[in-house]
Amino acid sequence: MNIKDRARKILGSMHDYSVEELKEALIKLDVQKSEAEAWLEAPGLRPYYRKLLYADERVELLAMNWADIECAPHDHGASTGWIQVLSGATRHTVFQVEKGHLPEALFTEIKKEGVLLYAPQHGVHKMGREGINPLITLHLYSPPIRGMKVYDLKKCAACIVSSDCGAWWPEETRQKIKEINLKNFT
Ligand SMILES: [Fe+2]
């Protein structure tokens, strides 16, 4: 069964969308690097190319093919999720954030192929490719991400972006739902 059919079968029949159930569903999907690769294109000048593999009103599954450019710090709005490293390694930074202020980096960790990363509701993080091996990741979120907030630390600003925008400052005005000016901690 191909990846989209498995996703429809497994994700489409979930009854409970708790953190543990989401993790179990991602493990059960058992997506291989080669399967995800078949759906991915080159990222071009953006941090990653994103491909939506499954979505319903409760859950979405995306694969991402990374360039050697890290994404901007961002949250996933009210969504919770898991990220699986299918290939390569990622440099993952977690931030703390206070309303109205710029996020501050708490720690950076390296996560290799096979690892699952938990992405909590309203948690701010950024990711990038570590090393030269291609980085491919698989993302399962519930509910589907709406109202993702992307930060520009140099501009001291945040932007709520539309659901077709990735974790980077929007290039098109229509992708900017709301722009917010922030205060620096110092
Ligand atoms: Fe993210």
Image (tube, helix red, strand yellow):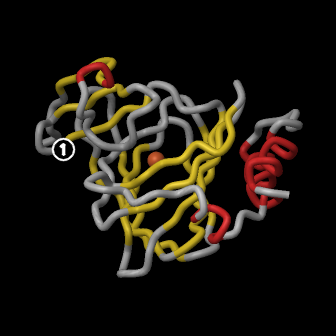
Give amino acid for label 1.
Answer: Leu
Q: Nearer the viewer, residue 176 or 54?
A: 54
Say which residue appears at 28% left-offset and 28% top-offset: 159
Crowding at mark 1 (Cα within 10 Å: few <14, some 14-19, many 20+): some
Tally of numbered tags? 1
Q: Is residue 55 left or right of residue 21?
A: left
Q: Which residue shows up at 38% across the image and 69% down it?
A: 129
* Between 90 and 100, the one nearer to me in the picture: 90
Residue at mark 1: 153
Q: Quadrant of residue 120?
A: top right
Quadrant containing the C terminus is: top left
What residue occupies the far bottom of the structure in this picture? 132
Q: Residue at x 44, y 32 (%)?
A: 164
Horizontal and vertical percent position of residue 124? 41, 44
Q: Locate the N terminus and report the quarter of the image it occupies.
A: bottom right
**Disc 1, ligand 1: is the CB inside 8 Å?**
no
Q: Quadrant of residue 161?
A: top left
SS at badge 1: loop
Q: Is residue 185 above or below residue 32?
A: above
Q: With respect to residue 128, does 53 lie above or below?
A: above
Q: For this rendering, which residue is in front, 90 or 9?
A: 9
Location of residue 26 by image quarter: bottom right
101 left or right, relative to 146: left
Residue 33: where, in percent of width, then height?
Answer: 63, 70
**Left or right relative to 36: residue 180:** left
Q: Position of residue 10 (x, y in %)?
A: 85, 46
Question: At x 58% / y 34%, what residue is drawn?
Answer: 79
Q: Position of residue 97 (x, y in %)?
A: 34, 40
